[in-house]
Image: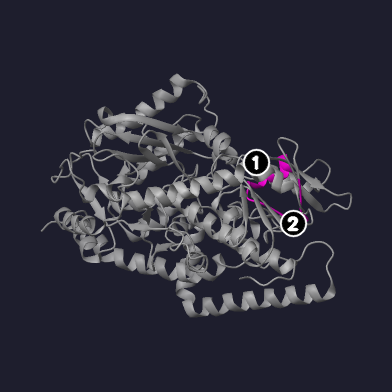
Amino acid sequence: MDGCAYWRAIFEERQARRQQSERERRREGEMWRRYLSSSGNAGLNALKEKKWDVIVIGGGHNGLTAAAYLARSSLSVAVLERRHLIGGAAVTEELIPGFKFSRCSYLQSLLRPSIISELELKRHGLKLLKRSPSSFTPCLDGRYLLLGPDRDLNHSEISKFSKRDAEAFPRFEKQLEKFCEFMDPLLDSPPPETLQGISSFSSRIRNNLKKSAFWAHCLRQAITLGQKEMVEFMDLLLSPASKVLNKWFESDVLKATLGTDAVIGTMGSLSTPGSGYVLLHHVMGGTDGDRGIWSYVEGGMGSVSMAIGKAAMEAGAYIVTHAEVSRLMVEDSGAVNGVILADGTKVHSSVVLSNATPYKTFMELVPENVLPDDFLRAIKYLDYSSGTTKINLAAERLPQFNCCNLSHPDAGPQHVGTIHIASERIEDIDSASQDAINGQPSRRPIIEMTIPSVLDKTISPPGKHVINLFVQYTPYKPSKGSWEDPAYRESFAQRCFNLIDEYAPGFSSSIIGYDMLAPPDLEREIGLTGGNIFHGAMGLDSLFLMRPTKGWSNYRTPVPGLYLCGSGTHPGGGVMGAPGRNAARVVLEDVNKPLK
């Protein structure tokens, strides 16, 4: 049995087992929508009736996570969301009748296991659909590469291109797993930042003891890892991903397939120093304890946000949609005193968490002449560049790939995981990146295609499919043309569709309709400054104690009572929840409440 046939057998078995009542799921979703809508309609009056313990600006997944933990600790919490639905970039929207799109984020792996268990997200409706195989790379020469959690099948698939690489691949995976285990405690902890501003002697002592304990733990972890592995770890962090991959492998298609994780959401190429860390960042997660496994979420990525939102509301948090914050209120003393909404409504609290980007928070929401000039300059000149465009498609049928001899109208293993289009060589990725650096969308874009409706039968009509295209590279401001020009947008979308046609003839003719979010759209619709999906670049100069900027990595800000809780803080972007949980811990420490 060849690899494709094996994966088809596994896939069909899993499909047969995955049966659940669509009517029950729809009823539960409708109950949730009614509850949120009613709270939103009555929300503005209720917001003004009291001074809240905590206000959270933005109902993205990190803001909701922070709200859940704070409410569980008996604080009164109000979440204010600008849009008509919660979730931020982790939302499900029915933009074409019958088709429900994970409009921005589209896969789950990074959500911290502690959050899933502590907030009981599965009880609140979170259902993860593991993908096996997890990756399919078609080649124009008629070959293909399938990868997944089965090591024997990986060996067989990679051997088609290189016996040496097939032997090296398990060692590569094992090393990355070791590095992820080393990083795990760092993700779930606030950085050991020096206390800012005036603090009591006892607070300084406690902070110094916590920092000492943190670094002592890191030292023990490093000793356990060993010097040789620590050197390899530092090499991965500092090197271009191309150097790392070239050291391990010789086959172009394997290196390019793995390399896409090192550039996703960035403007950089595989030759960019530090891109090795981005590669590691995208294998840090897992699904149900299986390291590095990405999954679909039943009902789309909005189901993640809905589950966290339910946990927050069960704990007592109050969530209001259509509540755009226009300005923070700051007292003469310099401390925050609440927010002013776009309609003029004032909502009072001495603690405010912002799930917005650092730029949005400090350059647009904080009043002028409140923040230090050097801090404002640091925030203003952070790297918010983005090369990402998201295209959501409704399709009549599945794409049929020339290279796969098992092409069939029904879903097969080639349709289950991430499909890498135009990623056959490292040079393909570098060339696409260079086009964007020169000011133009890539002539041959790098496309990650996913088809969640293959596993999730709740998001499309029977026999039809939802297809996600995560496309790179597209500059925010092209040197020629504009994303505001419908013809320009249509031309780029067709470029992507025509490229897929090279691998799967007839794909373009299957498209019923599509929604496209270029970088300016991601900024306008979702609030992502510059269209950057991580709230700011994930370079080595913007991580850990440097995120969002030096001296302010512990979620506190120069405005007393104002905290950041979004992806622009440690440990960074992705649907992770760690920034929200960590920020809640810092707030609870400051108000002398235990984390629950």
The relative height of residue 294 versus residue 466 in the rendered view (above or below) is below
Mark 1–mark 2 CB contact (< 8 Å)? no
Checking the image for residue 351, the label placed there is: 2
Span shown in magenta: 347-365
Q: Identify the amino acid type marked 2.
A: Val
In which quadrant will I find the C terminus? bottom right
Farthest-out residue, right: 332
Mark whose residue sits in front, 1 or 2: 1
Judge by depth and name the residue closer to the eye, 47 or 400: 47
Q: Is residue 307 visible?
A: yes
Judge by depth and name the residue closer to the eye, 593 or 2: 593
Q: How is the image coloured?
A: one colour
Give me the C-alpha separation between circle 1 and circle 2.
18 Å
In the image, taking residue 587 as reference, residue 109 lies left or right, namely left
In the image, taking residue 589 as reference, residue 225 lies left or right, namely left
Q: Which residue in the structure is indicated by mark 1?
A: 323
Q: Position of residue 279 (x, y in %)?
A: 44, 56
